[in-house]
Amino acid sequence: MLRATTAFAMAATIVAAFWLYHQSYEVRRLESHVTAEERRLERLQSEVAVLQAERAFLTRPARIEPLARLMGLRPATPDQLAIVKPADRR
Amino acid sequence: MTHFGSNDPRTRLRLVAAGVALAFAAVGVQLVRIAALPRQEARIAILEAVPQALPRPDIVDRRGRLLATDVMAPSLFADPWMVVDPGDTADRLVALFPDLDARELRRSLADRTRRFVWIKRGLSPRIAQVVHDLGLPGLGFRNEPRRTYPGVRLAGHVIGTVGTENQGLAGIERRIDAERGPDGARARDPGPPLRLTLDLGVQHGLEAELSDAMTRYRAAGAAGVVLDAETGEVLALASLPAVDPARLSESLDPARADKVTGGVYELGSIFKMVTVAMALDHKLAGLETVLDVRVPLTAGRWQIRDSHPAGRPLTVRDVFIQSSNVGAGMLALETGPLRQRAFLDRLGLTAAMRTEAGPVAPPKMPKSWGRAETITIAYGHGLAVAPLQFAAAAASLVNGGYAVTPTLVADPGPPAPRTRVVAATTSQAIRELMRRNVTAPKGTGRRAEVAGLDIGGKTGTAELPGRGGYDESAVISSFLAAFPMSAPRHVVLLSLFEPKPTAETGGQIAAGATAAPAAGRLVARIAPLLLAQ
């Protein structure tokens, strides 16, 4: 009787040990996965920052103006505008 | 009798051996698994405190367009413990970065007590690759936020500059650090972007027109500011030559100092706006009051006369439009030095001013305030103020008479309560005079006229103080404009420093021939951006 119980207990211990190890390694695996994802996020955020800076650099007025003039555009003049309703002065 | 296992010792032994073998096999399997999995993390533990650049919030214009941002850039460091040959390493690095100090570098690389030494901060990825390819042991890279200014020199003076550790050193950049405090500056999260009152389009228009005016009139420098006449919001502020916030040397160059907030100047006849407003506000004169400007004024051994004498008595209206020094002096004498001083105090022209970008150069007051000073201040000499401070005072004269404080950071809060500084009727009269000064055939500001826009303004030509007195050929030509004149929404001050006579100006350097037409072109350019919203 006792032999059967002991054998069962040993088997359970071994299974539990394996399960525990497995979980432990699974946690580590997930942790490293999280870290990798965080790094990826950081990299993407930094890429976004670079792209935004690049867009601002490429659309800076000092660059757009000569290009626009080359295309025959020019700044709007006041006579192209009509004041619809003059603001009331207090 | 109880038994454990068989009585046969051999069976027992086998059983134990199998258990042990199983356990070892399990360990073995795990070892293989661990070894087979790629190691995801490799961390360097550095015990030495590392000075590191921390992220800063972006700076954007009033419509959210980017003016300053952080991008990650590799910085090169060395671990002297791991450096095999400090001499050779130093030589090869200096060959790549000639600005490094070879002796200093060799010394720090040979210092085995240290585990971390910065060599070069904020490299471009291409240069970082070149260093990497040298294959020198003991060198490494760390990514750090590095400040970049996509507009290059656009609004450089307002933005300011940062140091190697991304700490704010001047302008708005410095204010960001002051606002965040030492703890905030150490935070990993830079926080939301800081929104300025500047408008990128208007700022560029101002810079382009100032640069054009500098070329046209061969001026040594130019400065301009565009203010919202009601709120004091600065829509554009520029001083040429400009600075690139990414180059510290430019920010430190005195020739590139900000003339709008960082310098004080005697601005000349644009001050007559203040003098006439003062006389009207004290009800000492009306627009039609006649002054005999034929007799020069005397103050001690000085004689004040008009550069283009009218040869007849002038009304206050004509004193303004023809810019008579004698007339302005007479109005100031009538008011008296005490009330003159009090009026300038009320307009904020005598007290030190601050903006979010730092203190404005404080006004330079006369040593004593006698008869001579009363007269000269009436036409803008003897009291030197920063152009921004004058523009704010002028805004309060045209906006119905309410005090204006220039501001650079957009504030979504409710508008501050308004304080009256001059009577509404005074403001109305000044608006009429400014408009007439542009439309009248004899008006000094007639070259500032812009078709389709109700623009008004006042010219000012101030001689720069030179050796032993004033220099007639070196002047600051300014134009103070507001539009639309019936209910001004914006005030513009444009100053040209030391313009030279050219064929275009008919050999003149006075503001009527230089600053006025430049201001007209500027307003024609920016008005559609400002009014069509």
Image (tube, rainbow, N blue to C red):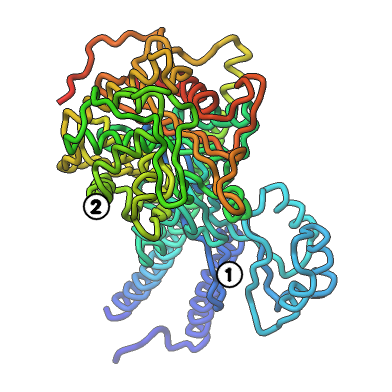
What numbered label is drawn on residue B44? Answer: 1
Q: Nearer the viewer, residue B138 or B381?
A: B381
Q: Position of residue B397 (x, y in %)?
A: 26, 34
Q: Label 1 amino acid?
A: Ile
Q: Locate residue B289 relative to residue B256 in the image: left or right.
A: left
What numbered label is drawn on residue B208? Answer: none
N-terminal of the pair, mark 2 or mark 1, is: 1
**CA gap, disc 2 and disc 1:** 71 Å
2 vs 1, front mark: 2
Q: Position of residue B255 (x, y in %)?
A: 61, 49
User: In which quadrant will I find the N terminus of chain B?
Assistant: bottom left
Q: Quadrant of residue B45?
A: bottom right
The local secondary structure at tag 1 comes to loop
Tell me if residue B193 can be seen: no
The residue to which callout 2 is attached is: B338
Residue placed at 39% from the left, 18% from the top? B438
Tally of numbered discs:
2
Residue placed at 51% from the left, 58% from the top? B166
Output the chain of dot 2: B
Q: Quadrant of residue B92?
A: bottom right
* Circle 2 Cα neighbour tier, 10 Å, few/some/many (<14 / 14–19 / ≥20): few
Q: Nearer the viewer, residue B264 or A67?
A: B264
User: In which quadrant will I find the C terminus of chain B?
Assistant: top left
Q: Label 2 amino acid?
A: Leu
In the picture shown, does residue B6 fall above or below A55?
below
Output the chain of dot 1: B
Q: Position of residue A15 (x, y in %)?
A: 38, 67
The local secondary structure at tag 2 comes to helix
Question: Seen from this angle, which residue lies furthest bottom?
Answer: B1
Residue placed at 60% from the left, 31% from the top? B214
Q: Locate residue B17 relative to residue B441 in the image: left or right.
A: right
Q: Nearer the viewer, residue B53 or B248?
A: B248
